[in-house]
Amino acid sequence: MFHVRISLFSQTKALENKIDLFHDKIIDVAMTFKKAIRVFLEEQRSAEYKKLSKQIKQIEHDADAIRRDIENKLYVENLLPDLRGDVLHLVEKLDKIINKYDEVAHTFYIERPEIPSEYHMRLLELCEQVTDCTENMAIASRAFFRDISTVRDYSQKVYFMEHESDITSAHLREAIFDSELPLANKIQLSSLICKVADVADIAEDCIDELLIFTIKRDI
Amino acid sequence: MDIAFFIFLSSGLFLGWSLGANDAANIFGTAVGTRMVKFRTAAVIASFFIILGAVYAGAGASKTLGDLGNVNAIAGAFMVAFSAALTVYWMVGSGIPVSTSQAIVGAIVGWNLYSGKTTDIGVLSKIVSTWAICPALSGVIAIFLYYIIKIVLKHSKIHLVRQDCYTRIGLILAGAFGAYALGANNIANVMGVFVDSSPFRPVDMGLFKLNGTQILFLIGGISISVGVFTYSQKVINTVGNNLMSMSPLVAWIVVVSQSLVLFLFASQGLQHFLTSNGLPSLPLVPVSSSQAVIGAVIGIGIMKGGTCVRWSTLGRIALGWITTPVIASVICFISLFFLENVFNQTVFLP
């Protein structure tokens, strides 16, 4: 009996740690991405950018492993039977954010877009907004597990930052298409900007669902 | 020992089986329904604690049933228990959680009517009043617990996974307490009418002694356990999911509320403590665990705005409350006639 009790608590603790670690990965990937874009704008596809891009890939791999571990633990140990579906869905959705960061960083690496310096500030601003949005998403999701009363506060920040990123990306694309750049270049830059802004869109979808899960979590 | 006694006792065992099939749902139905506790785990715990409660603390509520109708012939006791069991069996078959307490009270009143004995209106009204007090009290306790849990959760910031772990342990502990309270309170329904004709003598088991009534209650407790194992899953599905969709924490509140109510209506120790301190006490009466559960669920449902309670299911259950004692009474009256006139059995002593 004593062994069973200890085992139950240790399994609980292990899963708590995994969930926390998974959220850490979202914040890690956002910070690394922001740094990588700054490096790319200054140095293009330098060794430093390559290193950061690899780092993002590694975070994505680690997050995948943690996600699979969480899913496995939830099912094998029959934990959270009533909210399991919601938690799994949330974790998968959060993983999509990480995947998107990896995809965008890799696209920059492969395509090596030439970004005129007059757009650097706005692109950095967009990255700032997008990463801010996802960081708040991660905090809201963490709050879902510990303190549901604060989920709403963070969700408002996510909505706000997503809206800001939409405005910034629209202005940026408009400016690019108004410029004298070759059309191919314009399309390439526009597509990349959309990809960056997509990260915030995924975070917004995620927060929509999180708010529903929060209502369901209330006793 | 007279073999005829065991043949007549079979109806009580049948009633016990029906009670186990029906009322285990009230203890572990919500926990199993929300998949927090496996059915087999629930059945083992429920069986053990039902028997413990029945043997250790079953005497109080049993005495009140004796006061309502002192069924003084074993054949009569057989038919009283059989009528109640048949009623509960039919109702269980329809998937409605019914009240074994009301079935046995209806059957005893049927016996009183047939034998020409006067039904003690004082005792009857005391019992009937508990039919109203029981769900109301359970509802009040549930509302109180609901508030407490909300406040605790708000301030403790327990991780969801850990909360799940605590809830699981809480459900098992509450289920064990509920099973004990059910055994203590409801064994009267199963074996109460046989107490006067019990042939059992006290037995020294070494570590503890059992008197004749306790041996009778032990046998009744075992029959309830058999009911838990063999037939309770169908009703568990009804209580677990049909009345209101419940989170595991709400399930815990429901189980604790109904367990406390059953305990309050069964504990001689508590009654003695309250009366000796000049405080008002509740009568020791077998009450319906189904009503207690429904009271708790409604209490929480109202706190949540009343929109999540499926009132139609509740209406079907309420219909069962009225029909159960009436059906049991009619079956008992008619069956006693046949038992006496066709099978030449003495169903009551003048």
Image (cartoon, coloured by chain):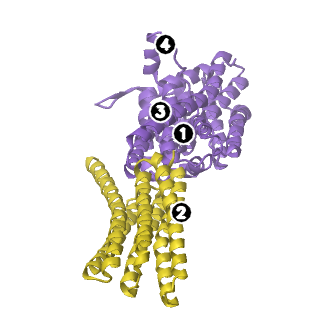
| A106 to the left or right of B70 | left
Disc 3 from disc 1: Cα separation = 15 Å
Of the pair A210 and A165, the residue shown nearer to us: A165
Disc 4 from disc 2: Cα separation = 64 Å
- Chain under disc 2: A
Name chain B's colour.
purple
Both on one chain, marks 3 and 1? yes
- Circle 2 residues within 10 Å: few <14, some 14–19, many ≥20: some
Mark 4 / mark 3, whichever is N-terminal? 3
What element does badge 3 sit on?
Answer: helix
Residue type, label 4: Leu
> Residue at label 3?
B181
Residue at image location 62% in from the left, 43% down from the top:
B97
Disc 1 from disc 2: Cα separation = 65 Å
What element does badge 4 sit on?
Answer: loop
> Residue at label 4?
B279
> Residue at label 1?
B16
> Residue at label 2?
A163
Name chain A's colour.
yellow
Mark 2 or mark 3, whichever is nearer to me: 2
